[in-house]
Image: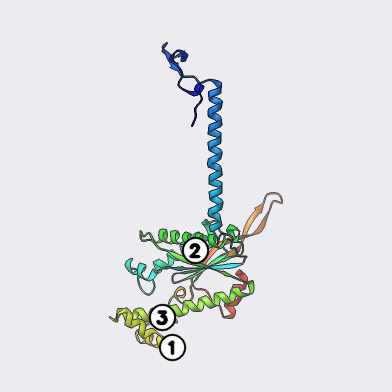
Amino acid sequence: MDIPNWFRAVPRNNIQTLRSNDGRRRPINTFSRDAICYLQRKISNISFSIKYSLTIGALKVKKNEIYRDIKTVPPIIIRADGRNFKESLKRLNFEKPYDISFERGMVTAARRLILESGLSPEWVFTFSDEFNILFKELPFEGRLEKLDSVVPSFLSSALTIALKIDTPLAFDARVIPMHPENMIEYLQYRQAEAWRNHMQSYGFYSLVKEGVNEKDAAAKMHGMKYEDIHEMMWRRGVNLGETPGWQRKGVLVYKKKVEKEGYDPVKKEKVIAIRTELDELWDPPIFNSKEGIDFLKEII
């Protein structure tokens, strides 16, 4: 870069001095006004060049982000499934086929998603290592990339904290567009899956505990009818119809409307206000029963 003569080193006889507090004189290098203006122009040009390069580079990169503008519309359900949880929970010595401490961790993670994530889902239905989350209003303007990444990452962190473990846990997620009329049907479908998983898990792990290796136990359970599994467990002293409700039917964490008595200072009288509280249903009704359908209509 060609530097003007007036910008070069200042001769010693042009150095000015100032008297400091201790009475001594301190030298101060001074540039001419032209030198300062020249320096400011150069800095400005360099700054503009950097900003321009960054802007052009960002635009080129964004063209490759081909999924960023894919969006969905409400309502939706996000289903998050644990990734490789079978092996992770085995290493952590959780009880099989069900461990109440693990389920409490899942419910705690669901509660924190509703209360602390800032995403404001309506309810969460959970069983095994699965979350089903209803959104009537969408964060991130409905961007699928955001929904499929932020929700499972929050749940992974919340569950790890709740279980007080140092083993990384991960969820994957999928977005399922919903029509209001299909929400009850969807929950019936997932609760039926909870029941199927419940029977299969009891049968499989009962064989494993008896010394059958996992491969042979899985082969024996494959294709076995529900009534045969029920009979197999009955002979082993377990009535699958009387196991805890959360194992058979899942847990629902939802916003419940309750009446609260308050006081109106203006009218100077007691008033009834409707408030929303978060509730946990550990023994929900069977969703395809009349009781279950009526209940779901209230919360949906």
In the rendered image, is residue 217 in sight?
Answer: yes
Give the quadrant of the C terminus: bottom right
Q: Position of residue 272 (x, y in %)?
A: 66, 59
Position of 94 with respect to 28 (left or right) is left
Residue pictured at 57% horizontal, 61% vertical: 143
Q: Nearer the viewer, residue 253 or 57?
A: 57
Circle 3 residues within 10 Å: few <14, some 14–19, many ≥20: many
Looking at the picture, does residue 194 appear above or below residue 278? below
Farthest-out residue, right:
267
Dividing the picture into quarters, in which one does residue 217 lie?
bottom left
> Which numbered circle lies on residue 297?
none
What is the CA distance from the residue labelled 2 to the residue labelled 1?
A: 33 Å
Q: Looking at the picture, which amino acid does disc 3 mark?
A: Gln
Circle 1 residues within 10 Å: few <14, some 14–19, many ≥20: few
> Which numbered circle lies on residue 110?
2
Q: Earlier in the sequence, mark 3 or mark 2?
A: 2
Q: Looking at the picture, which amino acid does disc 2 mark?
A: Ala
Disc 3 target residue: 200
Q: Position of residue 43 (x, y in %)?
A: 53, 33
SS assignment at label 1: helix
Q: Looking at the picture, which amino acid does disc 1 mark?
A: Glu
SS assignment at label 3: helix
Q: Position of residue 72 (x, y in %)?
A: 60, 65
Label 1 close to label 3 by CB (< 8 Å): no
Position of 21 with respect to 139 (left or right) is left
Disc 1 target residue: 227
Nearer the observer: mark 1 or 3; the answer is 3
Dividing the picture into quarters, in which one does residue 204 lie?
bottom left
Residue pictured at 50% horizontal, 22% vertical: 5
Position of 234 with respect to 2 (left or right) is left
